[in-house]
Amino acid sequence: MSLVQPAAAPEAISPLREAWIVYRRNRPAMFGTLLLAVIVAFVLYGTFLYAGDPYEIVWAPQTPPGTEASVPFGTDYLGRDMLRGLLKGGGPTLSVGAAAAIITLLIGVSLGGIAGYFGGWLDDLLMRVTEFFQVLPALLFAMVVITLFSPSPITTAIAIGVVLWPQTARLTRAEFLKIRELEYVTAARSIGARNGRIMWRVILPNALPPLIVSATLTVGVAVLFQAGLSFLGLDDPNTMSWGLMIGTNRQYVLDAWWPVTLPGVAIFLTVFAVSLVGDGLNDAFNPKLRER
Amino acid sequence: MAGPLLSIRDLKVEFATRNGPVTALDGISLDLMPGETLGVVGESGCGKSITALAAMGLIPDPPGRVAGGSILFDGEDITHADAARLRSLRGAEISMIFQEPMTSLNPVFTAGDQIAEAIMLHQKAGRAEAGRMAVELLRTVGIPEPERRARSYPHELSGGMRQRVMIAMAISCRPRVLIADEPTTALDVTVQAQIFDLMRDIQQEFGVAIMLISHDMGAIAEMADQIAVMYAGRVVETGSADAILDDPLHPYTRALIGCIPVLGKAAGLEGRMPPLAEIPGIVPPLHLLGRGCAFADRCPLAFDRCRIERPVLEGRSHRVACFAAEMEAA
């Protein structure tokens, strides 16, 4: 046992850097990061380098994985290469997930921030609007949005973002409500800062840690959501995605397990990795919770 | 001689509460002369901080509101000035330092960045230039190795240094009025002395008028030229520091002065210190104030009239609101 030593390096450490130091020591989080990096690398490889149309029929239908060298992951019910589908289908899945999380963050942080900062009737109004969106059945509402417009990855991302933002709004509002009472906000006001500056330059940076965690976890939820929507056939059938692969092959699952299982595993690994990263960020930003 | 730089006239501030409106400031008047230090003293809950916030136009509204009176800055009535005018005054003409240097700095930005921000709000300066000015300000307020400290985050600074950073930020635009709300309460006594020295130096150098708010009569006695004693949202005694310290008229002022511990004074026979003096009771909740003098229940001199009628400030330069003091004088 060694005595607690004071930090040897007196050089300034930013709060973000400090969080990174904690994060780096967190094994599950680093595993998740690595896993996510591998998945993203595969998806980037598939999107930009791996030549081959995932819709092209290349071999006998429902060839099991590992039986034919040219289709190592087997083929689906039409004889399409599963590997091509997994590689090319990851791009839309991940980017729709990320885009939906960004949309969630944009809507949620703006509305939640304004509600929490200004309070009063504006807060009441915005929170009633938020609640209105919150009580709508999420999947149904996303389906309505998609069917109103033509299905495309962009529509899907918007539909998911529109469904998921209320949580982020509530979280942001709570953070803003808490932070706006702190003395450094009064101090910022006392040097003549205007509201916009106080909201986005003073309060928001301090509210970021829980928001980053929430945004990360939202990516996972959005990936699942996207898979669910394309499983239901509501996504663009001309954009290969993991959910679409599951959806189109589901009728034949009793004859061939892999066309459904392999994209399912890909989705599982992605969401698992994102969750590990999110939990790791949560621990890194809230060191007090770590000791539990 | 010029008129007061900051003049609070008969200011009334109310807060809406569940028990109905509560008068936090009940017609207080204060004058801050250029280059002088006005000490505002009183216990917690007397309205000192509200006075400071009101002078900055920072009363949280709702639930608070200025219900009457006026605040004049250099002759200009800023009581109901619009937000833009108030912003252009805050930081540039009137600035403020706070009680808790731990919480009054933004934890996610470096000390230098925060000072530079304050500079850029009111002066035409680029980021690099503002950064250089910030380092110079840190030097002015006596922070060693200012170049390195400018890159420190608040949690890496000691309490005294943080308060110096706050002061650097407050004087960054050469304000004419500095409001210091309990600037040393959270600090060690030795650091308190350093901060007071720094404030005096800054006053000499920049000619800034200081409104020093404290519950500590000892601190006020050390710093102030003029003193205003507040109790339950009113000024109960006001005058020059000498007059008030040498000849306190209000029993509350006397009690506050009696609470200043004096080292080595009256050590008992066994060499033991006498217990610290205290004022019995607490400041009454503002919504329970009767029509009499708010201090009557704790006052050793109170008589019938004190509980029925509220005394007003009387006198020329040394003014006091107390019937007992009036009778003494008569």
Image: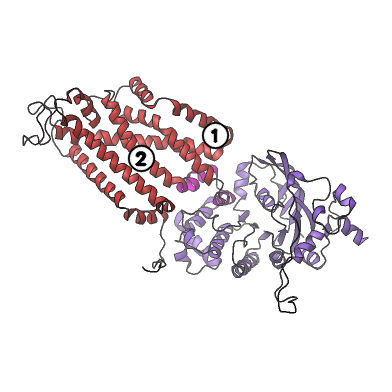
Chain colours: A red, B purple
Pick whichever, A16 or A245, lies toward us: A245
Q: Return the x and y of residue B248 as percentages of the image width and height.
A: 81, 64
Q: Chain of mark 2?
A: A
- Residue A6 position by quadrant: bottom left
Magenta stretch contains residue B27: no
Image side of residue B57 versus residue A45, left or right: right
Quarter of the image where the N terminus of chain A is located:
bottom left
In this picture, residue B278 sits left or right of residue A116: right
Expressed as whole percent of the image width and height from the top left, the position of residue A178 reads: 53, 45
Our reading of the magenta stretch's main secondary structure is helix
Image quadrant assignment for residue B65: top right
CA neighbours of label 2 inside 10 A, class few (<14), some (14 to 19), many (20+): many
Residue with the mark numbered 2: A217
First in sequence, mark 1 or 2: give its number. 1
How many numbered discs, if any? Answer: 2
Q: Is residue B322 above or below residue B242?
A: above
Task: Give the SS element for disc 1.
Answer: helix
Q: CA distance from mark 1 to mark 2?
A: 26 Å
Q: Is residue B155 left or right of residue B286?
A: left
Answer whether residue B265 is visible to the viewer in this image: yes
Image coords of residue B307 (percent x, y): 86, 49
Query: Most extreme residue toward the right, as rendered?
Result: B330
Which secondary structure, mark 2? Answer: helix
Question: Residue B222, relative to residue A227: is it above or below?
Answer: below
Please say whether residue B239 is visible from this viewpoint: no
User: Is residue B85 found left or right of A114 in the rendered image?
Assistant: right
Residue carrying label 1: A123
Residue type, numbered disc 2: Leu
Residue A262 point in image, percent of width and height = 19, 34
Which residue is rendered at x = 41% and y = 37% of the image?
A: A106
Q: Which residues are magenta?
A: A182-206
Q: State yes or no: residue A203 in magenta.
A: yes
